[in-house]
């Protein structure tokens, strides 16, 4: 009798099984009125690649009120969107933020109504997961508020920058606030500690900024004539020995804008591991500095449906305050 070879069990590294969902008919509510079809589908099919979403639209598998549509078709409240079965890989178990980090983020909320959340984001927390991070601010808030149907970032902050971030709770609020940003009707004010004494004659830096990739894939920004027009206004708040506390108001919203414009002016931000040289970084660490000294201090904006602007302010965290106290103490000692 010939023995049958043992059946091999699948290798842990083999591809995960696929999941195929049936046809769905989704009714467009008032909050999605005016949204593009492609953006609507990306929200409905979060784990499906963008290329597949565009393919099923092109093939006519997605229908609006039983008719074919284009990716840029604008939806209207009451429309019925047919979403076809889509084969997708079974997702890995999601890494959920722990209760402690959820509590920290809830305590950081400085304003909330039915349309908007504003959070004083801690330094070191990314606004969203990705690039090796399991989760960021938006994922933490979604985990802490499972009953909230819609939470999306209105704008972003660098991971190491602290301060005010707006999160929309309705799509209509997201569209309104992002349009306000584009029209430059939202004022952002940052506080930053820069290295050296800021020159009295420099009230703004108006230099184009270009993003580029380092050999290791890290993204950086530099002043370059081929870049995008960028403008930052600066104002001295307090001079210390070897440092200056500044107010920085970005008129445009480029990546690393304040950091690069401050460095271009010859006064990089204290604790900046991208644009401050090693000697400056070492001196700041010797002082007791532990973080990038950039804080989104204030926001002035209108709520949807209101003509009256409101202003919110966020206090510094302990690490930021500690550096300022050390500088003040050193100043006081030298004046005695």
Image (tube, rainbow, N blue to C red):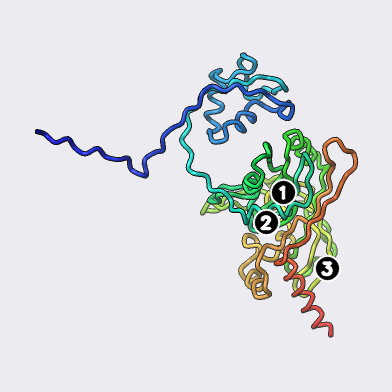
In the picture, which quadrant includes the C terminus?
bottom right
Viewer-proximal residue among 115 and 248: 115
Residue 208 disc label: 1
Q: CA distance from mark 2 to mark 3?
A: 30 Å
| Residue 320 to residue 314: above or below | below
10 Å neighbourhood of mark 1: few (<14), some, or many (≥20)? some
Viewer-proximal residue among 302 and 241: 302
Residue in the image at 75% along x and 73% along y: 242
Residue in the image at 84% along x and 48% along y: 300
N-terminal of the pair, mark 1 or mark 2, is 2
Q: Return the residue at label 3.
A: 238
Label 1–label 3 contact, CB within 8 A? no
Q: CA distance from mark 1 to mark 2?
A: 37 Å
Residue 104 disc label: 2
10 Å neighbourhood of mark 2: few (<14), some, or many (≥20)? few
List x then y, in percent, for residue 62. 58, 20
Residue 94 disc label: none
């Amino acid at each position: 009798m010939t023995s049958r070879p043992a059946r091999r069990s699948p290798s842990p590294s083999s591809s995960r099984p696929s999941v195929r969902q049936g046809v769905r008919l989704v009714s467009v509510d008032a909050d999605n009125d005016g949204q593009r079809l492609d953006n609507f589908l990306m929200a409905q099919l979060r784990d499906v690649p963008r290329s597949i979403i565009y393919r099923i639209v092109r093939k006519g598998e997605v229908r609006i009120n039983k008719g074919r549509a284009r990716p840029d078709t604008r939806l209207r409240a009451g429309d019925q969107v047919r979403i076809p079965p889509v084969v997708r890989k079974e997702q890995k178990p999601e890494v959920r933020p722990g209760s402690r980090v959820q509590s920290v983020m809830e305590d950081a909320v400085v304003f909330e109504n039915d349309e908007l959340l504003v959070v004083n984001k801690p330094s070191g927390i990314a606004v969203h997961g990705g690039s090796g991070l399991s989760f960021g601010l938006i994922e933490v808030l979604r985990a802490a508020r499972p009953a909230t149907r819609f939470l999306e970032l209105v704008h972003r902050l660098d991971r190491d920058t602290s301060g005010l971030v707006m999160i929309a709770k309705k799509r209509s609020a997201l569209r309104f606030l992002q349009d306000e940003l584009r029209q430059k009707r939202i004022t952002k004010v940052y506080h930053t500690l820069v290295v050296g004494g800021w020159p009295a004659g420099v009230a703004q830096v108006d230099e184009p900024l270009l993003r580029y990739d380092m050999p290791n894939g890290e993204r950086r920004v530099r002043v370059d004539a081929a870049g995008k027009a960028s403008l930052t206004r600066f104002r001295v708040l307090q001079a210390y020995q070897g440092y200056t506390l500044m107010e920085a108001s970005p008129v445009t919203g480029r990546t690393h804008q304040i950091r690069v414009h401050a460095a271009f002016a010859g006064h990089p931000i204290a604790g900046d591991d991208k644009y401050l040289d090693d000697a400056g970084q070492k001196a700041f660490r010797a002082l007791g500095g532990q973080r990038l000294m950039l804080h989104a201090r204030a926001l002035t904006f209108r709520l949807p449906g209101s003509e009256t602007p409101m202003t919110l302010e966020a206090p510094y965290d302990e690490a930021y305050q500690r550096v300022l106290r050390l500088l003040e103490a050193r100043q006081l000692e030298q004046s005695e």
